[in-house]
Amino acid sequence: MEMAITSEIGAREFYESLASNIEIKPLKEKISWLAEEERKHEELLRRIHSEMFPGEEIKTPKEHI
């Protein structure tokens, strides 16, 4: 579960970084949308983790996949 959360964080950060360097508005909007989707996935996984393992801290590495 922690690996999946880490993967979502890494993907979101990648899309956010990519979007910050794009000047073509429709493309920038699409990439930003993808970043938001990854954020939603992370949130869902965190909720599932807290239901499965109440009170257990989620450990993710500082550098994301």
Image (cartoon, grey):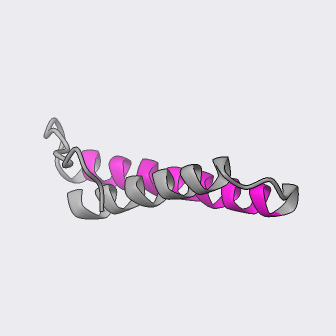
Does any portion of residue 1 appear in the rendered image? no
Residue at 21% from the left image edge and 53% from the top image edge: 52
Residue at 73% from the left image edge and 55% from the top image edge: 22
Q: Where is residue 15 in the image (x, y as percent from the top left)?
A: 56, 57
> Image quarter for residue 50?
top left
Q: Where is residue 27 in the image (x, y as percent from the top left)?
A: 79, 63
Q: Quadrant of the C terminus?
A: bottom left
Judge by depth and name the residue closer to the eye, 48 or 11. 11
| Count of marks, rendered view | 0
Q: Is residue 36 magenta?
A: yes
Judge by depth and name the residue closer to the eye, 18 or 29. 18
Q: Which residue lies furthest to the top in this view?
A: 55
Q: 1 above or below 36?
A: below
Predominant secondary structure, magenta span: helix
> Image quarter for residue 2?
bottom left
Q: Quadrant of the N terminus?
A: bottom left
Q: Position of residue 53 (x, y in %)?
A: 17, 48
**Position of 28 compared to 54: left or right?**
right
Does any portion of residue 35 appear in the rendered image? yes
Q: Where is residue 32 in the image (x, y as percent from the top left)?
A: 68, 53
Q: Give the range drawn in magenta.
A: 27-50
Residue at 65% from the left image edge and 47% from the top image edge: 20
Residue at 37% from the left image edge and 47% from the top image edge: 47
